[in-house]
Amino acid sequence: MSNIQLPPLLIVEDSNEDFESFLRYLNQYSSTIPVYRCINGDQALAFLYHTNRYTDPETYPRPGLIVLDLNLPGTDGREVLRQIKQDNNLKTLPVVVFTTSNNPRDIETCYRQGVNGYVIKPMDIHLLKRSIHTLLSYWFEITVLPFNLPQEI
């Protein structure tokens, strides 16, 4: 990876174990991607809308990519995705669902709502590592992200 400023990654994941695994493989991949974590849907929406304790956009910047678990406490990932993709200021943010759900209804619903990718978390540690590396490579090396595009007024 080059030395350019990479956009922040927002990981919305309630499982400490899953987050730590993702972070471990992320750090093996790159130490230059700024990472933020929210543990539930309400916290993720507060982060994105700069409400509650997330009011400072300098401290809590607009992410370049959101990795979203579906099965979250409170407001679940399905609702977070729906709100993001219906908001004119947020809908260009790429969202990749990273979940254990292989339910065809979840997959179809997420794509209908505008998700940019749907990845089922592999249980095998080697497949998990490969999935995370492929995800990061695609979104941070190959794809041009809509990072820092002006927001609509």
Image: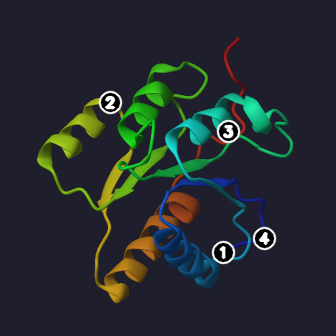
Tag 3 residue:
47
Task: Please identify the residue farthest to the left as the structure is shown.
Answer: 104
Within 10 Å of disc 3 (Cα), the crowding (few <14, some 14-19, many 20+) is many
Tag 4 residue:
3
In the displayed structure, 125 sits above or below 105; it is: below
- Looking at the rendered image, the quarter that the N terminus falls into is bottom right
Tag 2 residue:
113
Disc 1 from disc 2: Cα separation: 32 Å
Rendered image quadrant of residue 2: bottom right
- Looking at the rendered image, the quarter that the C terminus falls into is top right
Disc 4 from disc 3: Cα separation: 27 Å
Rendered image quadrant of residue 121: bottom left
Q: Report the side of 61 relative to 43 (left or right).
A: right
Within 10 Å of disc 4 (Cα), the crowding (few <14, some 14-19, many 20+) is few
Disc 3 from disc 2: Cα separation: 20 Å
**Residue 113 rendering spot, x and y as whole percentages:** 32, 30
Tag 1 residue:
1
Name the mark nearer the viewer: 1 or 3: 3
**Residue 127 rendering spot, x and y as whole percentages:** 32, 82
Q: Earlier in the sequence, mark 1 or mark 2?
A: 1
> What residue do we see at 56% from left, 36% from top?
42
Q: Report the side of 22 relative to 10 (left or right).
A: left
> What residue do we see at 50% from left, 29% from top?
84
The answer to whether the residue labelled 1 contacts the one labelled 4, judged by CB atoms less than 8 Å apart, is no
Element type where label 1 sits in the image: loop
Name the mark nearer the viewer: 4 or 3: 3
Name the mark nearer the viewer: 3 or 2: 3
**Residue 129 rendering spot, x and y as whole percentages:** 42, 81
